[in-house]
Image: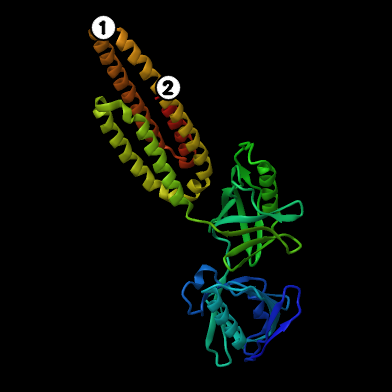
Amino acid sequence: MRLVVAPLAALLVLVAAGGCGGDDESSADASSVEGVPWVLISGVDVEGWEDAPPSITFEEGTASGSTGCNQWTGDYTFDGESLELGELAMTAMACPPPADEVERAVVDALEQVAGWRLEDEELVLVDGDDTELLRFVRASPAGAWEATGVLQDDALASPLEGTAITATFGEDGELSGSGGCNTYNARYTIDGGEIEIGPAASTKMLCPEPEGVMEQETAYFAALEEAVAFRVQGGVLELLGPEGSAVVTYVRGADELASLEARIAELEQQLEDALADSGDATADAQEMLDAAREKYEAVSGELGATSRQLADSQAELERRAAALTSAEAARSEAERAAGAAQSQAEQAAARADAAAARADAEAARADLAEACLAAVADVLRRLYDSDDIADGLEQAAEELEQIAADC
């Protein structure tokens, strides 16, 4: 096989690949393969290839795909069970390890392709001896993604700094995520490589900053409805408009549930710290807090079954955590001022009066701590009993913030 370099727009590497095969299967059967994006599941013996799996699509006489690093395209011909690939034009981007090894393995396999077959809805490409070379499954947008580009003013634009646009495509046809300010839900359907996304229902918050975030969100929701097709190549999901160009691009998202659980733990710790100054007089209250924590742990187990809703609430909790931190700082400053005033009063008062005042103050703090912890336990109890975990969590966060401010 000969590799040649041709003067294409972005320096393309042409790889000649071809083959022949039998004609036992009618060419009409190839229609089940064409127009469908396929993603590799086996055939590359390189550790780490799954991080950016290669892909292939056959459509109207043109095959295209990704090696996991570079993109390629070329002609193809189905004839029964035989498959002939013409010269493949491939971009010449430098690929770091292990992507370079993966690419060499994929290109080598494509050079040997001479036939194909379907096995349990999996596309198998074979050589002239009918030996399996590469195996693919139908690509799907299912999973968590983070947008890297959104069509805005007729061009793809990266999300504004400080914003995160996310999408979680569920296996049940449910789409949810964050538009950069508001969380949203929509329904989607796929047919081969085609996709249809219904109107997004979102929360109605108005985010004043960063500047342009609301316009960005409006453009994103419009791009979702404009999408008519999708492709998954090298760990990148692209939603395509009617003219075949990308209207939204995504990369795989991080484990948002783990991050959200860490934020919940941080909020709980902040609340404990806010109540810690109640001293030894809160021993009974501590038992209540332990009981509340046990309830929280039980609720956390149930929250694992609602990870998609929790992931969508992360941004909202971040903002509320910041508000809680500010409230705690203000409360601490007020306590320091109150302590100074109390100290001056104690110096002016008689020792007996000062002792009585301190005793009264200790009793008042103990009562306040008990009331605060009772309120916390009540909030967590209602969260545990809530039928709607997402709404319940949002309400609980607001009430906990108010309790922190009051206490």
Whole-Å distance between the Cαs marked 1 and 2?
Answer: 25 Å
Tag 2: residue type? Ala
Image coords of residue 340 (percent x, y): 37, 18
232 left or right, relative to 376: right
Q: Mark 2 points at which residue?
A: 334
337 left or right, relative to 370: right
Tag 1: residue type? Ala
Image coords of residue 291 (percent x, y): 29, 36
Above or below, comparing residue 401 to residue 265 in the picture? above
Nearest the eye: 390 or 372: 372
Q: Please identify the quarter of the rendering in which residue 354 is found.
A: top left
Q: Mark 1 points at which residue?
A: 350
Image coords of residue 233 (percent x, y): 61, 68
Residue drawn 55% across and 81% down? 105
- Quick check: can you spot residue 384? no
Outermost residue, left side? 352
Circles 1 and 2: CB atoms closer than 8 Å:
no
Above or below, comparing residue 263 to residue 10 in the picture? above
Residue drawn 62% across and 89% down? 24
- Quick check: can you spot residue 66? yes
